[in-house]
Amino acid sequence: MSNIRFYNAGILTMKPGDKIIKDGVLCVEGERILYIGEPENEPGGIKYDREIDVKGDLLMPGFKNAHTHSGMTFLRSMADDMPLDKWLNDCIFPREAKLTGEDIYWSTKLAVMEYLTGGVTACFDMYLTPYDIARATEECGFRCVQVGSMNNFSQSLELQEEWLDKLNHGNPLTTYMLGYHAEYTCSKELLTGLSDLSHKYSAPVWGHNSETESEVKGCIERYGLTPTGFADSLGLFDFGGGGYHCVYLSDNDREIFKKRGLYAVTNPGSNTKLASGIAPIADYLKEGISLAIGTDGPASNNCLDMFREMFLVTGLSKLQKRDASSMDADEVLYMATVGGAKAMGLKESDVLSPGKYADLIRIDMSKPEMQPVNNITKNLVYSGSKADVRLTMIAGKILYEDGNFNIGEDPSLIIKKVNEIGNKG
Amino acid sequence: MSNIRFYNAGILTMKPGDKIIKDGVLCVEGERILYIGEPENEPGGIKYDREIDVKGDLLMPGFKNAHTHSGMTFLRSMADDMPLDKWLNDCIFPREAKLTGEDIYWSTKLAVMEYLTGGVTACFDMYLTPYDIARATEECGFRCVQVGSMNNFSQSLELQEEWLDKLNHGNPLTTYMLGYHAEYTCSKELLTGLSDLSHKYSAPVWGHNSETESEVKGCIERYGLTPTGFADSLGLFDFGGGGYHCVYLSDNDREIFKKRGLYAVTNPGSNTKLASGIAPIADYLKEGISLAIGTDGPASNNCLDMFREMFLVTGLSKLQKRDASSMDADEVLYMATVGGAKAMGLKESDVLSPGKYADLIRIDMSKPEMQPVNNITKNLVYSGSKADVRLTMIAGKILYEDGNFNIGEDPSLIIKKVNEIGNKG
């Protein structure tokens, strides 16, 4: 635990109404932010372990990757440019069948490296073996909200109840939420059981939702209801939660999202690469649906880069609406940071403010694509890239700085291990 | 002029049929590649000024940005999220009217910095004052193919003839091609004059072409022909050339492109951000039209990042066709490198091969998003980013390495100057 002081900083707190602070100071005491503002009003008497002159660079909250499958990095570029069903059945499922908890542990660590280089300070992770994931992320010092991916073939109600208890009462870097993989991989009985669990603990529930047209069609054929309508009819959303993808929400689905305060987490990179379609995010925003952004897993995207996702959210909306003004960059930046934190229940990691966790990043303002400074937030969304991230701090600890990792593990060992998993065949 | 030897390199030559060389050596003698291959067969007797252990990183040809307006960096993020006509008339045109040659010189240098950080080794640049652009790019050591942007309001046939002579017989880093801004900004007389000039010099001709539906509609109303059909009817394409954007090419236009060997340069970032539409690149490819990729200018895109463009070319194609297999990553990588070089007439900068110019980049294979190595070229297109570019060399000179520029100018002065231009109001 150390105290760190940043000075000569531009500071984008992301608190609604706040303007960007110039020539500011941000002080971190242990895990939390102590002070943000002019150097004149800084609290005295703090002994700093390190003082960092950021030379006019920007400090801002880290990105929240609100939907991913971190443990799938081993599959990156193993199966691209093929139809979705062939991709799943011939490439993904057979390889996942051979996967061990140790494989997931190493693959997750590679994902954490990628998150840190891209300024992501927390992810909303849905994968197979939660204790291995927690071990990987906690060892790195990374913040991870896990969610159940229960279906007819893996995980169970009993396991989810255990994880809900264990993973919400251990290392504060880890939390857990109830979840199901998707309607089409779960029986009605299983989802009813999940609803019971949700009611027992007043807990929100998450799942893949309306990612493709055929998924929606299949659900209507089975139950006469859309995936959202069906889940809601079982009481799954009585305590909130939300859906991943949400490309095809009906008018009635959208009413349910608003009524239940559900989050739609959009994944435009994955929806693009798998040709699933464009989620009408501009409409959702106008209708008052809460929004967050995720990369989805590296098997489909193939990267874990929130800069790419931000450009796609606004760009695809403009294409879909045939209107260059349909989706403002500032809205997208909010979704990628504060929106994600709210969806993930990270109330202390949403904005930069005294008392909050010091989950923040330093953006290199000397990079050509961040200049000139006509509008910083538009630069971030339209020309920013992960190349602009100089430093990533989580809970007051610098985990990445100028190309170097501080994650308690040799990065080259992580890379070696994940290549071995990929080569298992 | 110096000799440089890279060793322990993966080498992607981009020559059709070549496999990636592992543990290879690439020797540069002066401006050109001397040797590529196994260390065993290396030529002796060369004195190297520097030997670089690339530690398994990848050497490959630099990207060719086949359509841009480099001098517009001063406008970045000055006018976003607004309809196209308002964007042009209220924001872009009034500011361009105040622009001096010196402004263009500095703005172009900022663009060169951005190209170098993103692994771009040449651009196809269309802007206002060619001598200022040439001065900027040549001073940096950057390769630039300029093209006329003649229209009813600026440039002229006489000037283009002068530039065609002067800029093709000076510094070999600079070449020049005939061009017109677009059909809708040029009179028939002007375009007829350009056709005469093209015939006088057997020179290809380039212009913005079918970027928006309204552009095509307007041309049909004026002349009863599409922009491609009209230009061809004037003999503008008798010696080749091509079009920028090409979002809306009719069947007959495509026949003309094939018959005349024209290049369609796609600009998906700009077409997305300005809501112009999706070019049917998968169809063009299938029909045998030659293809290249450009970023367009930083006022519309807003960045000059060929990694983003590559992802968009394949991703938007998949969305448009509703088929994840519609556009292969390898095809896109070819367009972004060799395709661009061919379009731009850079016959000695297209692939890595002895005798060719040493226009190459080093990709950092230790970056998490480049791992595991299931497929290097798919990693480049689907998860690669400018953050992976460690070194950019043009004509044997290292202009960018590990965040540092070697462009004969203090980067912070360039940034200061371009901010001043933006702030002129």
Image (cartoon, coloured by chain):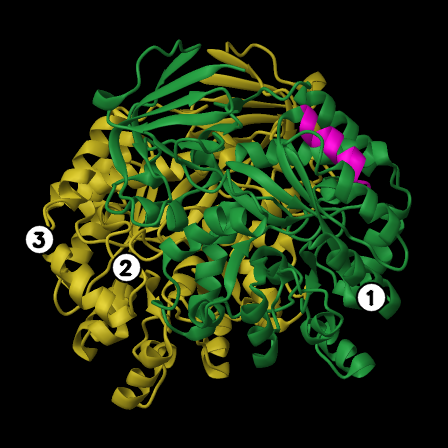
Chain colours: A yellow, B green
Q: CA distance from mark 2 to mark 1?
A: 69 Å
**Which of these two is toward me, A322 or A241?**
A322
Q: Secondary structure at mark 2?
A: strand
Location of the C terminus of chain B (image quadrant): top right
Name the residue tied to disc 3. Answer: A98
Q: Is residue B125 visible?
A: yes
Q: CA distance from mark 3 to mark 2?
A: 25 Å
Chain at tag 2: A
Which residues are drawn in magenta? B129-139
Location of the N terminus of chain B (image quadrant): top right
Asked if B408 appears above or below B261 in the picture, the reply is above
Q: Secondary structure at mark 1?
A: helix
Q: Nearer the viewer, mark 1 or mark 3?
A: 1
Query: The disc labelled 2 sits on which kind of residue?
Result: Leu
Q: Are marks 2 and 1 on the same chain?
A: no
Task: Name the residue: 80% across, 35% down.
Answer: B131
Q: Say the numbered circle drawn on residue B192.
A: 1
Residue A223 position, x and y percent, is 28, 88
Name the residue tied to disc 2. Answer: A178
CB under 8 Å between callouts 3 and 2? no
Asked if B4 appears above or below A241 in the picture, the reply is above
Query: The disc labelled 3 sits on which kind of residue?
Result: Lys
The quadrant holding residue B277 is bottom right
